[in-house]
């Protein structure tokens, strides 16, 4: 879900497990030549984490969705419904992942 734009997530896993490194590719449209973007994930108990790596800009890709592309890695410390928020300029979008116990 995004406001005033589009956010896409390509998950490189079947089921998100806690305490496991997980890769996600992102596509988000936004402002002109500004390739900067930030991500954070929030657990319902208020825990907030940043990606363990990335965002890494992908200049070339065969994944055809609107916007520019980045890759991130997350390692969720505990199970639960995590909300990942992407922010690019004034554009924000989010996805929710139901992370299971390892």
Image: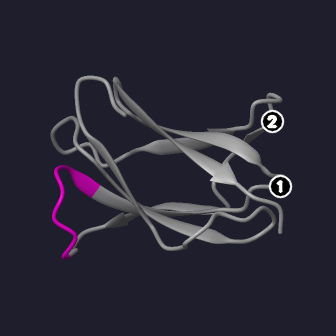
Which secondary structure, mark 1? loop
Q: Residues within 10 Å of mark 1 (few under 14, many from 20)?
A: some
Q: Residues within 10 Å of mark 2 (few under 14, many from 20)?
A: few
Which numbered disc flags the more N-terminal residue, 1 or 2?
2
Q: Residue at x 75, y 58 (%)?
A: 100
The dot on residue 98 is: none
Viewer-nearest residue: 31 or 39: 39
Image: magenta residue range: 62-68
Q: Does the magenta segment cover residue 67? A: yes
Q: Which mark is residue 77?
A: 1
Residue 47 is labelled as: 2
Please tell me whether residue 46 is drawn above or below residue 34 in the rendered image.
above
For the N terminus, the quadrant is top left
Q: Please state the horizontal and vertical placement of residue 87, each as a whole percent of the image.
A: 43, 34
C-beta proximity under 8 Å, tags 1 and 2? yes
**Where does the image place residue 77, in percent across and percent down from the top left?**
83, 55
**Residue 16 pos. (x, y %):** 64, 63
Q: Which residue is at a point 61% across and 67% down the rendered structure image?
A: 15
Q: What is the x, y in percent for residue 14?
A: 55, 72
- Does the magenta stretch mainly form a helix, a strand or a loop? loop
Where is residue 25, by image quadrant?
A: bottom left
Residue 64 as seen in the image, left or right of residue 88? left
């Amino acid at each position: 879900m995004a406001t005033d734009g589009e956010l896409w997530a390509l998950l490189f896993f079947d089921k998100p497990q806690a305490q496991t490194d997980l890769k996600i590719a992102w596509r988000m449209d936004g402002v002109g030549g500004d390739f900067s973007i930030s991500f954070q994930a929030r657990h319902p108990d208020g825990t907030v984490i940043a990606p363990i790596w990335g965002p890494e800009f992908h200049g070339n890709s065969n994944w055809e969705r609107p916007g520019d592309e980045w890759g991130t890695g997350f390692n969720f410390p505990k199970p639960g419904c995590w909300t990942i928020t992407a922010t690019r300029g004034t554009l924000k979008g989010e996805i929710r992942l139901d992370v299971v116990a390892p």
